[in-house]
Amino acid sequence: MDNNFLKVKNYLVDLGFDITFEDNEDGVLIIENQEEAITNLVIGVANPLVIIEQYLFTKKEPSVEMYKSLLMKNQDIIHGAFVIDESGENILFRDTLQLENLDLNELEASINSLSLLLSEYSDELIKFSMN
């Protein structure tokens, strides 16, 4: 098992996350913690990076107002940011960390940033996903 993959996996276990899927060969972990509103959070371990990605919603006809609001909210997010995927329809949260000096606190801070974002901004995200 890759040492970096194992390091990230052990950090996630130490932080109390349930690992619902893992693929060491591809460097993918999927975690959840219902108390933190984290569901199907994808962690990719791809030396030299750890990529944290959470699908939020799909928007078939995005509006300028939605994009503007999401970009403005990016300014308040401590770690990570709102992004769109290649299709231009899926809105995600994404953060990228360096593996070389990754520690438990840094990984925790990144995931906590997502949890805080979901709790503070959930009404707006629901509204964007419905319209």
Image (cartoon, rainbow, N blue to C red):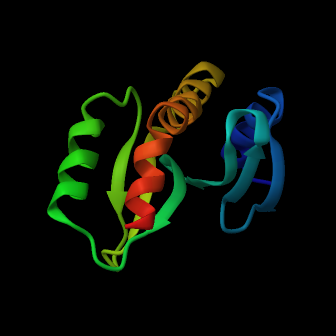
Using the rendered view, name the quadrant where residue 38 is placed. top right
From this viewpoint, is residue 93 visible? Answer: no
Given residues 11 and 1, the one toward you in this image is 11
Total tally of numbered discs in the picture: 0
Residue at horizontal 54%, vertical 54%? Answer: 54
Residue at horizontal 75%, vertical 47%? Answer: 32
Along the horizontal axis of the image, is 124 left or right of 88?
A: right
From this viewpoint, is residue 80 visible? Answer: yes
Given residues 25 and 41, the one toward you in this image is 41
Residue 2 to residue 107: above or below: below
| Quarter of the figure that contains the N terminus | bottom right
Q: Position of residue 6 (x, y in %)?
A: 77, 44
Residue 99 to residue 61: above or below: above
Residue at horizontal 44%, vertical 38%? Answer: 121
Residue at horizontal 53%, vertical 29%? Answer: 116
Q: Position of residue 49 (x, y in %)?
A: 48, 47
Along the horizontal axis of the image, is 42 left or right of 21?
A: left
Q: Position of residue 16 (x, y in %)?
A: 82, 31
Q: Position of residue 123 (x, y in %)?
A: 47, 43
| Quarter of the figure that contains the C terminus | bottom left
Along the horizontal axis of the image, is 43 left or right of 56?
A: right
